[in-house]
Amino acid sequence: MEVYNNELNDQNLQSVDQQEEGVVSLRDLWDFLRTQWKWFVVSVLVCVGIARLYLATKNNVYQRHAVVLIKEEDGYGSSLRRADALMQINGMMSGSGVSNEAYVMGSNMLMQEVVDVLHLDVLYFYRSRLRTVSLYNEKPFSVQFLGSSNTIGGFKARILSANECEITELYYQDTIDNKKVETKETRRVRFGERVSTKGGDFVVVPEVEHLKDFNQELISVVHMNPEHATSYWSAAVNTDVVSKQTSLLRITCTDTNRKRADDIINTLMEVYKQNIIKDKNQVSENTARFIEERIALVGAELGEVEGNLASFKERNRLIDFNQNANAFISRSTDARKHTVELESQQVVVRYLMDYLKSSANGNNLVPSLGGLGDNGIQNQIAKYNDMMLERNRLVQNSGESSITVSEMDTYLKAMRQTLLASMEGYAKSVDLQVKQARKEEGELSSSLASMPQQERKAIDISRQQTIKETLYTYLLNKREETALQLAVSEANIRIVERPYGGVVPISPRSNIVLLIGLLTGLILPFAVFYLYTLFNMGVRGRRDIEKFTKIPILGELPRRRGEDNDSGIVVNEKSGDMLSEAFRIMRYNLTFLNKDAKVIMFTSTMPSEGKSFISRNFAYSLAVKGKKAVLVDCDIRRRTQSGVLGANRALGLTSFLSGQVNDYKELLTTAQAGSNVMLLPAGPLPPNPTELLMDERMSRLVEELKRDFDYVLLDSVPAHMMADAALLSRICDLTVYVIRVGGIDRRYLPELQRIYAENRYNNLCVLLNGVVESGSGYGYAYSYNYGYGYSTPESRKKLSYRIRRKIKKFLRAIKRQ
């Protein structure tokens, strides 16, 4: 039943420990901040300093915006809508026209043109304190790289004078072989002089207005090949649709130089406009080429007809045969006019059919001629040209192998066949009409059988001349119309907002970085102390003892310098230091625990926990109050007390226990001159120390000491090292179990509680050694700081000592940092 109660008690202690372990009160937090404030100050200063150093090394990054409107009312926008509609009708997917334009505006093809226009493949930098500053318009010189190269290279140049500079640290990297070559050579170069290197040739051209501003300044120059430069600047530019309900595009450029960002946006919009105009003029340019070819051909035929007419008149000596055919002409004018119009349409249709059948014109636009009388064919030609424009634009961005391009090629081929079939049908219709018109003219010609043969030939030649002249005039008019269309073509965009943006950089955010540094400085000590507490399984102080056990606590001794060296006497009754005060409290608490206790044994869990030091100084603490105390060195094996107090004699406790000496008084020695403390040394090391302590002579010795002394203090061995402490417990009135803070694992405390519950040691109590002064509840401050509210010379002296001690400790911490 007793064992069951002990196990239940252990479970309850563990349950209380688990409940209290995760509870942190505001008082605990305040005490922690109050006692560890210097670490928070140092951490905040260091983290904020690192944040400021980070800000000092980073360049300000600005963001510039521009907004353009994509016009879709007519022209190119309407072509896009018609192309989208045709693709959707045929089951093909099609995105928004505005979204497509957003992609085109952000494409690498346009960015490469921007890089070429602004020479963005060459970058310039210089160091300003901790930052690397980018130069753009204000650079002292510009570098012109000659020829094309697949290398990424650069160098550093220092301005020496208005005529020359010094080039150092030349390097280049071949993007094909990925080999980097560096040279540390230094050369003096005159401005305008051609510099030949393995990475390419270049010329340094001075910028006179900024040359003096960078005298003796080291300027870094980086040259990228077109592919890398395009990728680099494409990442800095973003285009997106403002909203789905509008046709507005927002262009955003992020750069460390606001002027360069504005120039990139403006140049990108201008290049985009020029590409749109170029696309729109493709139909007109193709039509103009077709018309020029037809004009040359018809002109040659007209010249031939006019030559035939002149030769005919010269051979037949005819001056004006119109007078001979006035009656005929007046009757056949309408028929001939109708025939000429039909034959003109017939020629145009034949030309277009030959153009469509030619494989060389497979991806070209179909000329748009207004001479056709069928509006349906005109509409088909317009739709075909719109689709061909969209297909060619997709090829530029996606390539010939794109699935969308292949689908469009299939659809265009079908449209071309349909258009050719329509023209063939229309050509047959025109042929029938021409045949009918010629038949009517033939009937008129038969009525002229009585006219001279020469006059009939002249009329035939004149008719051919009229046809050629009409067709030639028609082509000339179309050429002027096409030229006018080329002159007035404009892009389908309108600039709504020129580049704009705030003067405040978007990166780095100084306030946020400093705030992060401040928060990190505040959190870091918490984290460090939390991890230390989490991994520190040692006993931390009074609270751990009270949490895990019900063992009474005799007192707490503060941590001191040189704690590993427990030699000497530190108790001074006239001193007001913390250690002397702790022994006074320990002496005072003894009257509450057991005022009749005369035999007190000191033990511990492991060696080096301070039991010998404590027993020795406690004996002197009793002696200064007039009590007679004897200190018995029961640690026969190590004989710590005997060695410290200089009593390593040949005779001692073991001599009495073994029977060599019958009167213990012969073995006593004065521990310190002028004190009431006597020492019974350990004596020589026997082969059976445990058997000697079990002998009845030990009990007799203690009884004799009790008659002659007020207190008998036994300095025993550690309880877990030897059985000596358990043997001596039978003759003790009080057992003081010394625990050094951080010396043993907290998980041992339930075992100590079990020992206490089983009463293995008489009147077991705990004495904490090496307690760190703290307000966290684990320290000794609250144990005996109570009562110092009165201002006395002694209290003021103690307070001054504590203040000086804290200042010195803080200064040592700063030096270590």
Image (tube, rainbow, N blue to C red):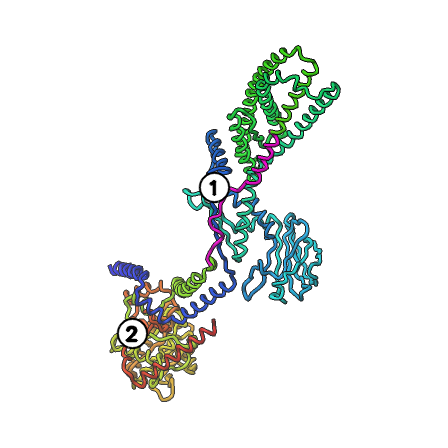
- Left or right of 720 in this view: 411: right
* Depicted 406 relative to depicted 165: above or below: above
Choose between 38 and 82: the one closer to the eye: 82
Dot 2: few (<14), some (14–19), or many (≥20) neighbours within 10 Å?
Answer: many
Residue located beneath label 1 in the image? 71
- Identify the residue at horizontal 53%, vertical 57% (top origin): 259
Choose between 710 and 47: the one closer to the eye: 47
Residue located beneath label 2 in the image? 734
Residue 681 in view in this figure = yes
Q: Amino acid at mark 1?
A: Lys
- Where's residue 355, x and y in %? 61, 27
Dot 1: few (<14), some (14–19), or many (≥20) neighbours within 10 Å?
Answer: some
Q: Is residue 276 magenta?
A: no
- Left or right of 128 in this view: 614: left
Q: Quadrant of residue 547?
A: bottom left
Region rendered in magenta: 474-502
Q: Secondary structure at mark 2?
A: strand
